[in-house]
Image (cartoon, rainbow, N blue to C red):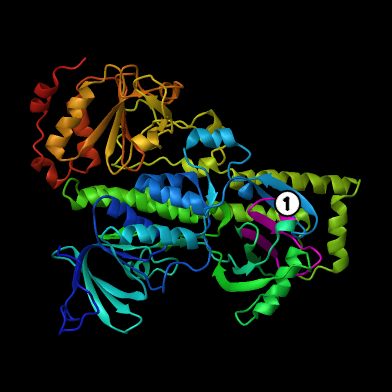
Amino acid sequence: MGSISEDPNTSPSNQTPVNKAIETDFLIIGAGPAGASLACFLARLNLKGILISSASGSALTPRAHLVNSAALECLRDLDLAVYDECVRLGNAGNTIEHYTWCETLGGEEYARNYAWGSGRKSEYKAVSPCKYMDLPQSLMEPVLLKWVSGRGWIVRFDTTLTSFTDESESSDITATVVDKVTGLSYNIRTRYMFGADGGRSTIAKQLDLPFTSIPGGGFAYNILLRADLTHLMQHRQGNLHICMNLDKDYPLIAAIRMVKPWTEWVLVVMPKGPNVPNEKRSHEEWAVIAGDIIGDKSVSIEILDVSGWAINETSADVISKGNVYCLGDAIHRHPPTLGLGSNTCIQDAFNLAWKVSLVHQGHASPLLLDTYNTERQPVAAHIVTESNNILRLDIGLWGALGLRPYGTSDEERKKVKQTLAAPTKEGREARKALSAGVKSMHRELHALGTAYGQLYKSSAVYGADEIAPFQPGPLESKNPFENYDPCTYPGRRLPHVLLGPGSRIPGPLTSTLDIAGKGQFTLFTGIGGNKWRDAASTVESNLGVKVKVVGVGIGLEWADVYLDWEDKRGVEEDGCVLVRPDYFVAWRAQESGNEAERLVKVMSTILGHIGSKSATSIGLQETALASTNGEGK
């Protein structure tokens, strides 16, 4: 494709007439967490394109906020400076330590839970070099957009996609967009287009993607407010507080979410009965509601923004067609329970970017891009279902705490509250229900398995050498939502293991995740695995794809300081673990032998050459490989 240097707003007397299509290789629609991160990951691979958004700028309100370790690993891979800036801007530690259920923020507390790894620190530390943090979307987006705009990407706001057409002969796509400021309509011709345009995705709609949707989720409001609640948070620090306000018949429930400790908040209100707030409710009226829920009339409240949103249970059954790929909220729409929304968006992008790069450069068949749908669609569907399952658990807990349907009398509501403290059989059962409900929320607040436990099954994962199907470890078998057992089974994540300098002289420890990634395949081996280095060279010569080889063991580049790699690698010392650019294990070999032949076959399969028209063009001949590699063991 041509360059993207043309300016769509130049007049005919300047450079480019408005009827000439601008050309680019990559066009991303939407500049939220999905679109902005995808642009960054492509830029990291030295690819340039255009990113447009119908919004006037990056997010002005916090919206998505919880960033988990898996998403932060992606940003860490992008650029440590980006990761460090996110850590600087985010809140972690005791500011997000708890999740509470209370009458009001200034009133009685019914229960609390540790959250986001704070109660299981050693388990979370063993899984990732990154810690959970609260980083509002309004702070993350500018970091990503600044980074990508400084690396050759054109970023344009106030620009709306109106339609697009496929050019079947060239596989190109022509998108028609409108500059909302000038009213100018122009075309962008692109090789690949990416729909990161949110829950009302124009692209998903025009592609006619099939969706599975369960209706009836309801509606909620986010009220961004400024109020100094420092005096209320001294002994209940945390970033989420469910306020029951049982003496009132509105709302159904309210959650107060910390944005800036302890002066800026989002009040999430789920109305009930005829008390559904409308768009015309004044900020003064919202301030009264917020005051009731905060529970301290001395607090000064300033309403900054009010926005409504639907509670969805919707996921796309197909997430791409041709050279158009959708990601983020365009394909998975769900309530914020679990806190996996923007995290899933970022990981969609991380999965997609390296595949696009290899196909675009001609190193992989388009079959590799088919695995984006195969791998990420099930993840999206699962997250949508599980987020709504958590909301259903929430509702059960709220009932145990005394929440009753609209219209319940004041006397009945007071009776429910009194029952929790009553020394009666009824009171005992109510307390048991409350205890069970609070413990059930570990499934949301310690969802380590849900966040990390994906098992990809696609042609980009080579599992033919495995002697048995995947079996989860003992913790995961017990509870796959809360627990995660790291392993190197193909299709699982590369385990985070801290390695030391190979010199055996103590020095800084480095995560296997920091050794792998960076846009390339990585092969881990050990003592006796030197021929894997020659095999990697053969792959690069035959396929044009670099495989970084890493030795772990005495006398090699890295030392297994705590012997954790020995426990988790799942292969013999002279075997290997092949890791994709997105940190997922592509293949493993139990032992050495026929290294070049095996590695070329595996890489050819992953890259989509075997079984495709390109298979005959990569010059692979088993006899030549055998003579190069020797007879093996």
Left or right placement of residue 334 versus residue 575 in this view: right
Q: Nearer the viewer, residue 432 or 449?
A: 449
| Percent coordinates x, y for residue 272 in the rendering | 69, 70
What is the quadrant of residue 219 in the picture? bottom right
| Percent coordinates x, y for residue 91 in the rendering | 56, 51
Quickly name the residue at label 1. Answer: 234
What is the quadrant of residue 302 in the picture? bottom right
Report the residue at 48% width, 44% height from top.
Answer: 69
Residue extending furthest toward the top:
633
| Percent coordinates x, y for residue 23 in the rendering | 18, 68
- Quarter of the rendering occupied by the C terminus: top left
Q: Is residue 20 above or below residue 457?
A: below
Left or right placement of residue 487 versus residue 113 in this view: left
Asked if the magenta segment contains residue 33, the reply would be no
What is the quadrant of residue 509 in the picture? top left
Few, some or many C-alpha atoms within 10 Å of disc 1 (few <14, some 14-19, many ≥20)?
few
Asked if the magenta segment contains residue 237, the reply would be yes
| Percent coordinates x, y for residue 203 in the rendering | 34, 68
Q: Nearer the viewer, residue 348 or 507?
A: 507
Residue 328 visible in the displayed image: no
Q: Which residues are magenta?
A: 232-258
Residue 117 visible in the displayed image: yes
Badge 1 amino acid: Gln
